[in-house]
Amino acid sequence: MVNKTDKPVLLLVDIQKGLDDWPFYGGERNNLNAEANAQRLLQFWRSKQWPIVHVRHSSKNSKSPLHDSKPGFAIKTEVAPQNHETVITKQENSAFIGTGLERLLKDQGSSKVVIVGLTTNHCISSTARMAGNLDFDTYVIADATAAFAIKGIDGTKFSAATVHEVSLANLNKEFATVLTTAVILQQW
Amino acid sequence: MVNKTDKPVLLLVDIQKGLDDWPFYGGERNNLNAEANAQRLLQFWRSKQWPIVHVRHSSKNSKSPLHDSKPGFAIKTEVAPQNHETVITKQENSAFIGTGLERLLKDQGSSKVVIVGLTTNHCISSTARMAGNLDFDTYVIADATAAFAIKGIDGTKFSAATVHEVSLANLNKEFATVLTTAVILQQW
């Protein structure tokens, strides 16, 4: 499954303490196991000595829990970067905008990108769409991502689970291959 | 609403004959008025002499109705470009990848982008997400876009209307402002 000359990169996106401010992000969230699954994948990647890139969001909104003046800017303990691991900071949803990430991945010879983190419909979708469109072989791990409930433009409420599932369906086979943590741990 | 020193650009995305091959794209489609609304907006833009960019998709898949060898590659008659209007061709979902569109918009001094076309969840969403993240003031016109039904990763079928509404909700206030054709025609 994995070509040894091109080790897959694990991209951990926005797994930051500020995302625990549920009311700020929409109230209800699905898949409370996302962080634990991301942690299992991170440990697997470390054991394989495959490349890891931590991405953190620095909000331009001073009231956001992800503003860099806030404690919420910190990456969650369970996936905290180790000293030698790459950490990049973004200000937009897509990890590819304003960060040099495309260059970084190409310079290290990475063509296969595995994306985990928060949130399914915003930063994960934006990052996965660009990764696919930039011709990276892109994977999104369904149970290592999560979404918040949102309101439709006519006020209809969509549950976090619906937002999550529709957003993954929008990505699957068009931009990325959607897999589960277990498939990676067992087959890669 | 419109600053006369910065005329909004109308970006018409993938309104091509090949999209009429519904079985290829998922079977069921919502909002059959999308093309007619895009046409009304195009006529409005022409009457205002505001900038217009037609974007067409050139599929890398030789079996796709949007492969440039197929009649479906043609832009639909109701929104066919006039001679002096800009037409760009893309091979990815996002109109900003591999096309020079960001440069083109910046060179002509455009900071406000209005997006219409097909499909809501794939090329419209990818283009609007990048437009927003590239700091364009971005608008998506809900009733001048449409989606096809898709299957979730567990096989659950999501109707075209659900895909459309959730995808617009994912965009709204995060990447773009979602408006209707009537609001533009009456207030801009």
Image (tube, coloured by chain):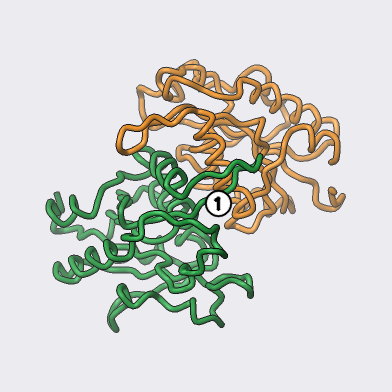
Chain colours: A orange, B green
* A3 displayed left or right of B42: right
* B106 displayed left or right of A146: left
Q: Mark 1 points at which residue?
A: A130
Q: Position of residue B116 (x, y in %)?
A: 34, 59
* B33 displayed left or right of A109: left
Q: Which of A147 and B29 is in front in this view?
A: B29
Q: Where is residue B175 in the image (x, y as percent from the top left)?
A: 38, 43
Q: Where is residue B150 in the image (x, y as percent from the top left)?
A: 55, 50
Q: Nearer the viewer, residue B4 or B144?
A: B144
Q: Nearer the viewer, residue A89 or B72?
A: B72
Under circle 1, the secondary element is helix
Chain of the residue under label 1: A
| Amino acid type at image mark 1 | Met
Q: Position of residue B54 (x, y in %)?
A: 36, 70
The answer, for residue A43, to whether it is visible in the render is yes
- State which quarter of the image contains the C terminus of chain A: top right
Residue located 14% across and 67% down the image: B48
